[in-house]
Amino acid sequence: MLFKLEPRGDASITMSYLSPVLAGILTLITGGIFFASLGHNPIDALSIFLLSPVSDLYGLAELGVKAAPIMLCAIGLALTFKAQVWNIGAEGQLLMGGVLASAIALALIDVESWWVLPLVLLGGMVGGAGWGLLAAWLRNRFNANEILTTIMFNYIALYFLLYLIHGSLKDPDGYGFPESALFSDSALMPIILQDTRLHLGIIFAVLAVVAAWVFISRSFVGFQIKVLGLDSNAAKLSGFKHKRLVVLVMMISGALAGLAGAGEVSGPIGQLIPSISPGYGYAAIIVAFLGRLNPIGIFFASLLMALIYMGGEIAQIELKVPLAVTSLFQGMLLFYLLACDVFINFKVKFAGKKTADKISVPTNTVVEK
Amino acid sequence: MNRPTVESSVNLYQLQLVDITKQYPGCLANDKVSLAIKAGEIHALLGENGAGKSTLMKMIYGVTKPDGGQIIWQGNNVDIKSPLMARNMGIGMVFQHFSLFETLTVTENIALALGDEAGDLKALASKIELVSEKYGMKLNPERHIHTLSVGERQRVEIVRCLVQDIKLLILDEPTSVLTPQEVDALFVTLRQLAQDGCSILFISHKLNEVKALCHSATVLRAGKVTGSCIPAQAGTTKMAQLMVGDDTPISTDYPKSTGADVFLNVTDLSQVSDDPFGTHLKNINFSVRSGEILGVAGVAGNGQEELLAALSGEHISSSSDKISFADKAVGTMDPRERRALGLAFVPEERLGRGAVPEMSLKDNSLLTGFLHGLVNKGFLNNEKMEEFSNQIIKDYKVKTPDNKTAAQSLSGGNLQKFIIGREIMQNPKLLVAAHPTWGVDIGAATAIHKALITLRDQGAAILVVSEDIDELFLISDRLCAICDGELSPTKATTDTSIEEVGQWMTGVF
Amino acid sequence: MDIDLITNVLYAMVRTGTPLLIVALGELVCEKSGVLNLGQEGMMLMGAVIGFIVTLTTGSLALGFIAAIIAGIVMSMMFAAIALGLSANQVATGLALTIFGTGLSAFIGSSYVGLPITGLNPIAIPVLSDIPIVGKMLFAQDLIVYLSFVLFAIIYWLFKHSRLGLTIKAVGENPHAANVIGLPVMRTRYLAVAFGGAMAGLAGGYLSLAYTPLWAENMTAGRGWIALALVVFATWRAERIILGAYLFGLASILNLVAQGLGYPVSPNLLAMMPYAATVLVLVMISNNVMKSKMYTPMSLGKPFHPHS
C-alpha cells in the first residue's frame, strides 16, 4: 500500500459537505467514460442526459413532479436512519399508501366534493404509516431485524397491489387490463403550474423538508432520535424511550412515503396501475445518504435524483441506451459517496513502503474493563 | 523452560531498549526511553495512566513500531515486525484487556495464538494442563472462555505464553482485575518463573505491589524516563514522586462521615440477567444514607453491571418495592422518573454511555440535564444549554477549547470531570458512580475524589462501585463487596481491612 | 395427495432451494468473519447475467458458470474495497452493492432478455434415483445441486473441525484480539467476502443457466435477501441453513402444490408466500433474544480499522 488512513479524531465538517459533490463529479466522469465506450461523445451524451431534460419550463416542472415523491420518502428515511433504524421499506410503504389512497378514491368515485382529496391523501398516509408501524412492532416486540422485514414488506406490498389490481380494484370496464378505473376529478391533485403536470405534491414535499429540519435540529424529540442513533446506551441511560422512538420514526417515515404514493396515484397517474413507482423508495435511500440525512441536503439531492430519472428516459430515446442506465447511475453515485465519506473521519497519509505494515492496535481508546 | 546460563557478561541483558521514541499525532508518547532487563529479573515499568507504558510494551511485542531508537535482544539489534515474530523470539505478553475469544475453548484460544506450532488439539490440551499445574494456575482446557472468571481468564493468557519457550513475559497492569488473594498467588507464579530464568516486565502504577515483587524499576512520566531504582530500597514516596512529579498534590486522607437518614434502600433484589454472558443478582440487600459514601468492591464481571443497571433504571425490576429512594418505591420506574426523584449516575463507559462521542459538550450536557430547564415546551433552550455547559466546564476545570468540542476529543480525565460535573450540578440526592477514576491521571482522580467528598458533605447519598480497592478505602465511609451476584455484609471502613474486603471479593462472607 | 405429486414436490423443493442454499452458505462464511454483506442480491444478479451472456456467446455452460462465479467475486471485491479497505458502513455499502448490481445487470442484460439457451440438464444416478419419494429429490438433480451438497458438507466441516474455521470465528468475534495475537484479520475477511461473492455468483448463474434457464431483469426476486434472513434463521449454523433453504424452496413452489391439489389460489397471493414466510421465521427466531445474542458473531457489521 502506498498510502494509509489515519483517524482524524474529530470528524471533518468540510469533508462531509464536500463528499457528495466529489461523488457527483466522479459519477459524471465515470458516466462520461461509459458513454464514450458506447461510442458517444461523452460531453454531448452527458448534456443530453443531464441538461436537456430541464431546458424548458415543462422540463423543470417535470423535475418537480419526480422530485416530490423522492423527497417525501427520503425525508422519512433520513429520520429513521438518524435513529439507526434501517428502514429499507419506503418503496413498500409508498405502494401501500398508493393502494389505500386508490381504494378510497375508487370508493368515492361518484362523490364530487372538496373533502375527497384530503381523505385520499390521508388514506395514503395511513396506509404507509401502518406498513411502517408493522415493521416497527416486529422489531420492538420480536427483535426482528428491520432491514430484512422492510425489504420483505416491499415485495409483499407489490404482490398485494398486483393481487388487488387483478381483483377487486380492477376496472370493470377496462377490457381485462390490470388497471383501476380513472379517479374522479375531486380525487386528483390540483395542478399548480398551468400546462404542466406539476401538482400540489411538491408543496407537501417542501413543507416536509422545513418541518423535518425544525424537528431534527430544534426539538427535544429530535435530539433523542439523534442520541438513539449515535449511542443507544446513552439514550437508555438517559431514559429516552427507545421503542416509542422507533415507532415514531417508522410511522412518520411510512406516512411520508404513503403520502408520496397517494400523490402519484392521484397526481400524474390518476389511477392505480401495476407500476406506480419506478423505484422511488429505493432511490430515496441514496438521496437520504447523499443529502447527509439533512433535510436541506435532501432537498437538493432529490432534485438531482429526479434529474437522473429524466435523463435516463431521454437517454433511452436519444442515445438508444437501456432505461436501466438510471439505476446504474444511482448505484454508482452511492458507491462513490460511501468511498468519499471515508475522508470525513480519516485522512490519507502517503507513505513509503517502510511504514506500510499491517500491524495494528485497537482504534477505540476506551476499552471495556 | 530453558534456563539460560550466564556464560559471559557481554550477553548479560535479555533485553535492552535504547532511546526508543514514538510519536503519535499530537503527542510524543515515548521520548528517548531506555531500559535494560537481565535474564531472570522482574523489572517494573512504573507510571501513571498516559505516561507511555502501553506504547512502549506494544513496541517490544511488535504491535507498533518505534520511530527511533534500538531494541537489543540478547545482545543483538532487532527489528520486531509482528507479534508473531515476538512470540517466536520468546516474548510473551499478557494484555490488560484480554485478547481472548469468549465463544471458544481454552485450548482453541491457545491453539489460535500458537499457529501451526499448535499441532494436535488433544496433545495441546494435555500440555496446557501440565504447564498450568507446574505454575499453580489450575485450568480446564475444555472450558469456554465466557464461563471463566476474570482471574481464570488471566491464567489462560499467562499459560498461553508459557506453553511456548518463553524468555520474556510482559504483564500489563495484571493485578487490576484480581482480588488481593489472587494477586498473592500470581506473585508466587511470577517469582517461580523468574527463578527458572524468565525475565518479567511488570507494568503497574501500584507502588506497594512493585515494592513487593520487583527487583528493579524504571519510572515513566509523560513519555520520559524520570528515574530508575531498586524498589525495595527506594520506598514508595520516592517512587510516587518520580511518577507524578513534585507539583501534583496527592490526597491520602479524607475525614469519614456516618451520614443521616437512609436514602437508597435495596431489599431482596434478585434478577436473572438477560445477557447470555451476564451474572444473575441474588438476594441483594443494602442501604445508603444521605451524607455518606458506600463503596462496593469486587472483581469485574461479578454482577456490578447488573446491579448498576437495576439502580439506574436501565433494567426495570419486577416489583417496585425492591428499590426505594427515601421510602418511595422506585423499582418499576424508568431512568427518567428516577432522575426526577434526585438520582444522578456516572456510568463506567464514559464515551458511549456517559457521553455521546460525536456530540459536542453542549449537547452532551443536555443528555441528562434535560430535566433542569434546558427544554422548553418540547424545544431546546439554546441559551440555557450554553450557560449550563459552560458552567460545568468552568467549575470542574475541564480542559477543552470550548463547549462545541466533541466529547470524543477530550482526554479520559477531562471527560470524566465533565460527566461528574454535569451530574453533580443537578444537585442530586443520590449519586451512583461506577469506576469513577479508572484510566484517569492522578491529578484528575484527586479532583474527582474531592468533588465526591464535597457532594457527600452537602448531604447527598453516594454509591461508588470500583475495582480499585485503595480508592474505595480512601473515599468510602462504609464498604462491602460483590461476588457472583451476591453482596457481602457492609462494614464501616474504619472497622475493616483490605484482607477482609479481599475475602469478601472471593465470596467468603 | 399421490406419491407422484409428493416425489415431484420434493424434487422441485430441493431444486428451488439450491440457489438459496448456495448464497446462504457464502453469506454464512462472510458473517462468521464479522462482515455483513447486504449486497447478495446485486452479486447474484451480476452472476446471473454474466453467466447467461457467456453461455449464450460461447455455447459452454461450464464457461458460463465460471464467469458467473468470477462476476460474483468481482462484485464482492467492490464491496470489500469500500467496506473493509476504507472501513465504511457495511450496511450502506451492501445496499449500494445491491442497487448498483441491479442497475448494472439490467443494463448489460437488456438486449438478452428472453433469449433461449439450453440449460443444465439433470443427471439421474442409476438405481439410487429410483428410490421411491426421495430418489428423485436427491439423485436425479443437476450437477450444481450435487455440488451444493458437497459445498454444504465442506462448510459444515470447516466450522466444526478445521483451524481455518476457528480463525474465521475468532476474527468475527474479536478482530482486535485476533490482530494482537497475530491472526491475519483483514486477509481472512477479504477472503470470506470473496467466497460469499463466488457463492452468490454461482447461485445467480444457477438461476439463469439451470433453473429458468433464461435472463430477465431482477430475476433473483429477492432471493439474496431471503438468504440473508436464512442465515439469521439458522443462527449461523450450516446444518440449519440447508434445512431452511429447502423450507423456503417449498414455500416458493406452493403454487405447484396448489395446482396439483386442484385449489385455485391467486398466483399473486401465492407469490407473497416466500416473503411472508421469511418475516414469520425472522420473528420466531429473533424473539429469543438470549439465543440470538449467543450465536451472532460478536463483531458482525462493525468496521475494523488497523492503523500502525
Image (cartoon, grey):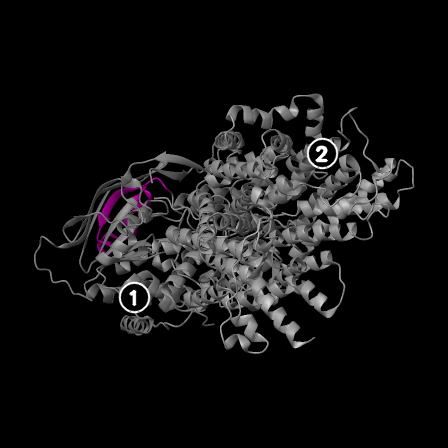
Mark 2 belongs to which amino acid? Ala
Chain ID, mark 1:
B
Residue most toward the top?
A56
Which residue corresponds to mark 1?
Answer: B118
Percent coordinates x, y for residue B401 in the rendering = 47, 32
Percent coordinates x, y for residue B140 in the rendering = 37, 73
Query: In front: B361, or C17?
Result: C17
Q: Which residues are magenta?
A: B221-248
* Residue at image point 65% right, 37% down: A216
Which residue corresponds to mark 2?
Answer: A205
Identify whether B82 is placed above or below A10: below
* Residue at image point 56% right, 45% down: C112
Percent coordinates x, y for residue A333 in the rendering = 54, 36
Query: Does the rendering let one see residue B337?
Result: no
Percent coordinates x, y for residue C158 in the rendering = 41, 65
Q: Quadrant of the N terminus of chain B?
A: bottom left
Query: Does the rendering let one see residue A93?
Result: yes
Q: Is residue B234 magenta?
A: yes
Query: In front: B87, or C50?
Result: C50
